[in-house]
Amino acid sequence: KNQVEQSPQSLIILEGKNCTLQCNYTVSPFSNLRWYKQDTGRGPVSLTIMTFSENTKSNGRYTATLDADTKQSSLHITASQLSDSASYICVVSGQAGTALIFGKGTTLSVSS
Amino acid sequence: NAGVMQNPRHLVRRRGQEARLRCSPMKGHSHVYWYRQLPEEGLKFMVYLQKENIIDESGMPKERFSAEFPKEGPSILRIQQVVRGDSAAYFCASSRETQGNYEQYFGPGTRLTVT
């Protein structure tokens, strides 16, 4: 069964600290893996997209890694800001085309 | 370039009524996707449409739910005879293409509450 599992479910950190979110998937065949940020009451916004041949991709203070062999990905957030408080969702595309498979997300709270 | 537009943002319906959710894709995008997000759950794919065609409706319940994307106008997700379990956030996304690392851009969602 195609699944995307994320951990932790929620996380609280102090402003300025770094954090790493984890994603494991069992989707096959695999096309690409995406990380989205979803603010409360808003739609998801794409942070990174990686194919199986890419190990790492950065977008500002966000750095995603991918290990296609172990089917694991991580999202590292550097020097967190209050505006980083959101749900971070790992999404896997099973094949070139349409259906995206979403994880439940990790809820990050950054406090001052 | 305006993003994906959805309306209404909030919709309240009584059990048995019909709900109509609208989605206008980004300019130049001909591919539209609908997703449902139940409380405490991840987004679940419902249906993928191109202009005047349903391409993949594997995630949409067989009964009471229908979707269309006419040649002119927004895409419509229609839920007939709503039940309390239909209460959820419904997100629409659009893309210019579907190959490679294509981007899906999401709208702000419609939050449906069935009373």
Image (tube, coloured by chain):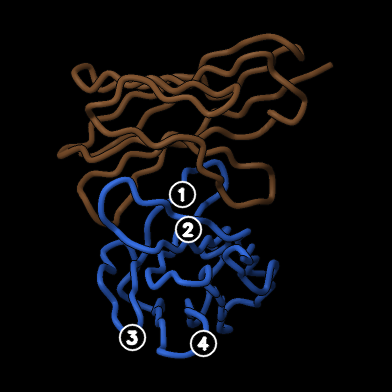
Chain colours: A brown, B blue
Q: Which mark is residue B36?
A: 2
Q: Which mark is residue B73?
A: 4
Q: Earlier in the sequence, mark 4 or mark 1?
A: 1
Judging from the image, mark 3 belongs to the subunit labelled B
4 or 1: mark nearer the eye: 4
Q: Specify the amino acid type for callout 3.
A: Glu
Mark 1 closeness class: few <14, some 14–19, many ≥20 residues within 10 Å: many
Q: Is residue B6 left or right of residue B70?
A: right
Q: Residue at image x 84%, y 16%? A: A112
Residue B109 horizontal/vertical position (percent): 60, 61
Local SS, label 3: loop
In space, the residues marked 1 and 3 are separated at their CA atoms by 25 Å
Judging from the image, mark 1 belongs to the subunit labelled B
Q: Residue at image x 24%, y 39%? A: A2
Residue lying farthest to the right in this orientation: A112
Local SS, label 4: loop
Query: Mark 3 sits on what residue?
Result: B52
Judging from the image, mark 2 belongs to the subunit labelled B
Asked if the residues shown at circle 1 and circle 2 are in contact, with their CB atoms under 8 angstroms apart, the answer is yes
